[in-house]
Amino acid sequence: MNLIQIEIPQPTHPKESIMKKIGLAMFALGMLVFLSGATGAFENIKLFYCLGSLGLAALGGVLFILPSRNDGLPGIKNNGVMFRAISNRGALAWMTSVFLTGFYILLYWYPEYLKGLITSTDVISFGMTGKAATQWFLYGTIYTLAILVMGMKMIIKYRHSRYQIVRTISVMFFQLVFAYLIPHILEAFQQPEYYFTYFWPLKTSVLFPNDLQWLKSQPGALPQFMVFWGVIMSIIGVPILTYFFGKRWYCSYVCGCGGLAETLGDPYRQNSDKSLKSWKVERWMVHSVLVFITVTTGLLWANSIYGGELLGSASMYFSRWYGFLIGAAFSGVIGVGFYPIMGARVWCRFGCPQAAILGIFQKYFSRFRITTNGSQCISCGNCSTYCEMGIDVRAYAQRGENIVRASCVGCGVCSSVCPRGVLNLENGPVRGRVST
Amino acid sequence: MNHIVIIGNGIAGITAARHIRKLSNHRITVISGETPYFFSRPALMYAFMGHLKFEHTKPYEDWFWAKNRIELVQDYALTIDTVLKHVYLQSGNVVQYDILILATGSLPNKLGWIGQDLGGVQGLYSKQDLDLMTVNTRDISRGVVVGGGLIGIEVAEMLHSRKIPVTMLVRETSYWNSVLPLEESLLINRHIRHQGIDLHLETELTEILPDVHNRVRAVRTNKGDEFTCEFVSLTAGVHPNIEITHKSGIATERGILVNEYLETSTPNVYAIGDCAEIVSEDSTPKSRVEQLWYTGEMQGETVARSICGERTKYERGILFNSAKFFDIEYQTYGSVPARHADEKSLYWEHPDRRRSIRIVYTSEQVIGFNLLGIRYRHEICKQWIAEHRSIEYVLEHLDQANFDPEFFERFEQEMIVLFEKQTGKKIHLRKQRSFFGFKKFLGNVRASV
Ligand SMILES: Cc1cc2nc3c(=O)[nH]c(=O)nc-3n(C[C@H](O)[C@H](O)[C@H](O)COP(=O)(O)OP(=O)(O)OC[C@H]3O[C@@H](n4cnc5c(N)ncnc54)[C@H](O)[C@@H]3O)c2cc1C
Ligand code: SF4
Ligand code: SF4
């Protein structure tokens, strides 16, 4: 019997391609030119310089990433993750972490040192908003570029999984359109800069009395719609969507912080702490932030109703300190700066008040769960290791229990990496959701 | 309160310990030599490939054992005195037991090949084997894998992940065709070759050739070929590890003999997991050794129940298993014979030739499922088989069985079309819930083309 007629074997050992090298060179050159612009050297050819250097760097990034399509057949690409310095808290990881942290410190507290770079992006800013760039414009531009370029990498890496492709395209879209283009276009039309994809309590101003009143007092119909949109979504939209789809509709499909974590941060997801202790710390921290912000919002409203007599200027300090501690120090410096050391979702896990609220809904009022497939688990630990939220998924899977956890952002990576097809993210009847 | 001593901290022994703790207050001691803590043996490959660190293969944090009053002793048990109820350890310590559970696992087979003890030649079973393999495969130009089973393909994948060229020698005419039906087996052959593995079918190892340092230099096959290599992995299956029973009076054959209650020939001594050979009078063959993670787990749970009051028969239930061949996941439920006799089989393969579904049925009912690259629900398949559902019923409800992630392609319609074509019968698809009936519409279009 010789039924075994098979096509010629094709070795698919990945080779460092020439394209990758060219890409890297272009990226380095682009960054170099962009940084040197900080000295004001390209005053006369600003447009060319700015778009040219950033474009070169981005294109270089894309060229570097594209050849990874040839890294063998589609499938899980975690070979060597635990051996490489960058993904295993080696020297390279620490360097990256120090660089990112330093960048955030400059950005938040010493923007004057970034002045050259900020003015470098003036041309784009003028083109979009008609105004000179601020540090936030520079930040938003780099942030969006990072999500787009690294999003491509994510899509190529998980090209065997439609779930991963769909949600990555989704975060790329929402970041580019709703968190970057629309707010700036609004500015260009003299409208308030508004982010339609951020709600209270992540964006406190959506429900803070002063901000609301200010927005309401703006001329035109659009600001009125913004007031309506923000309030309705924060109070009704978020719970309803979470009931149907779980927290993931926001954290893994819409949110910009999630977007950066899932693209730029994807190579670091295995570094999140899975211990029971870290779960305890997480619950205390994230819920404290939520309580703090809810109390603040309540006080501010009470204060505004009583005409500012209740708190005096104390409320000002309150929100200013919140802005410093939570908004800047936590979400930026630690949240992104520590990507290579603590995994990409440090902020989402320990600090984000939106995640806390979504989590409460997900845990108690939602159709979402991760289903465990009977007794097929071999306790290998891939799911737990690659859960960026530090959930010990295996602890449930090996007992045949479904996973219903407040912190799960529904990234679906546990399901993707499981070698036995044990896990599936699903929406279904709330009854019998926890046990199988 | 009894003192329960368990030898072996693998899935079987540890599951027994955990469940005994859940059900009782007995004192529990687990003696095991290989590692201080329980780890997932099937995960060893991922530690080698760098997906995980060895740390990650431990299913419980280290504090878990003390908290649950499960005493762990890292030592080798040498002999047992079943009269005094003593276990003698390598360290010289003696442990007194009231009830003894043997869960000593397996040892890799060595089939007496010439040169099997040379440097660079090894099997893969234990953590020590893994460490040795790490050393043995450093800076080599080629590795040879001997054996066409589950561990063989894992070793091939491990080497491949470190960019080491692999030659795979398989005795059979096609990969794992003692278990997989021909179509699936061919699909996997193709996939192995597609990965760049140099797969040789119908090829047997005849000799492993040494160099001057007594390390492997090459292997020779029955076809007269010689493959230069610095590493050889022998993966010709495993056999029960029964060394501990030597001179103890506990009856053994291939494995440690137990009845359906997992009791050995000696009172108060049980055997579970890979090391046990289960004898049941009313089945053919009369005895069987089950060398699976899942069966070890089920046996551990069963023995715990027996010890904690309720003497319980071990029942394996409807068979299931899973594996992964490089990038292709494999799940199986019920019985899918490699060569079928009376039963019929509906086999569908995706045009990409990397995914397939097989449903095996008789004139009365569906008896088994084989899936490659597609996930099905354990509970549903089990239920259908147990409830003796007909092939028509199963096809009508097939969407319930699918366990692939959202947005993935679905293939229920293809299965139905195939069935209708093969039998001339008509299946009325249950109304699917989907947005605007779009999927159904698509399905109809496809069916009518
Ligand atoms: C590489 C590999 C991959 C596998 N993949 C799968 C899979 O995907 N799915 C599946 O179902 N099965 C798989 N298996 C099989 C599965 O791992 C075994 O069936 C299972 O581990 C057996 O569990 P056990 O508890 O019976 O024994 P073991 O896991 O072997 O544990 C026994 C322990 O007892 C110790 N021991 C033995 N004798 C003594 C003594 N005298 N004193 C002290 N300690 C002793 C041993 O050192 C060992 O640590 C795989 C096996 C291997 C090797
Ligand atoms: S449990 Fe799974 S889906 Fe949820 S956050 Fe962790 S890896 Fe993502
Ligand atoms: S990855 Fe899958 S098999 Fe491994 S521990 Fe998690 S659920 Fe179990």
Image (cartoon, rainbow, N blue to C red):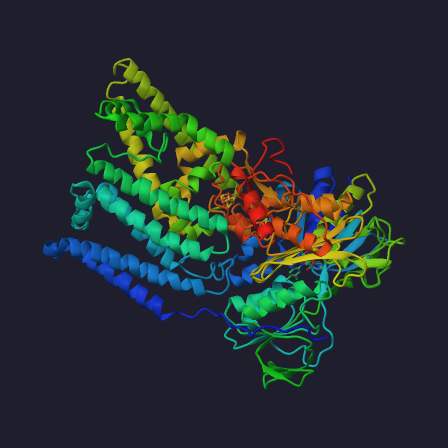
Residue lying at 33% horizontally and 32% vertically, measured from the top left: A203
Q: Quadrant of residue A34?
A: bottom left
Q: Is residue B10 visible?
A: no
Side (left or right) of A7 relative to A315: right
Residue drawn at (29%, 59%), measured in percent from left and top? A59
Q: In the image, residue A399 lies at what x, y percent?
A: 64, 43
Horizontal relation, residue B375 to residue A325: left or right: right
Please tell me which residue lies in front, A253 or B442. Answer: B442
Q: Residue furthest front?
A: B448
Residue at the right extreme of this rendering: B281
Give x and y (percent) for residue A127.
Answer: 18, 45
Q: Which of the 4 quarters of the picture holds residue B126? A: bottom right
Of A312 and A426, the residue lying toward us: A426
Front residue (pair A23, B235): A23
**Coordinates of residue B231 in the picture (x, y in percent):** 59, 75
Image-based side of A67 in relation to A387, left or right: left
Q: Is residue B64 above or below residue B130?
A: above
Locate residue B93, reporting x and y percent: 72, 56
Along the line of sight, the residue nearer the viewer: B124 or A172? A172
- Residue A94 visible in the displayed image: yes
Vertical arrangement, residue B266 with respect to residue A26, above or below: above
In the rendered image of this protein, does residue A191 appear above or below residue B291? above
* Total residue callouts: 0
Quarter in which the N terminus of chain B is drawn: top right
Q: In the current view of this chain or complex, which residue is farthest to the left?
A: A44
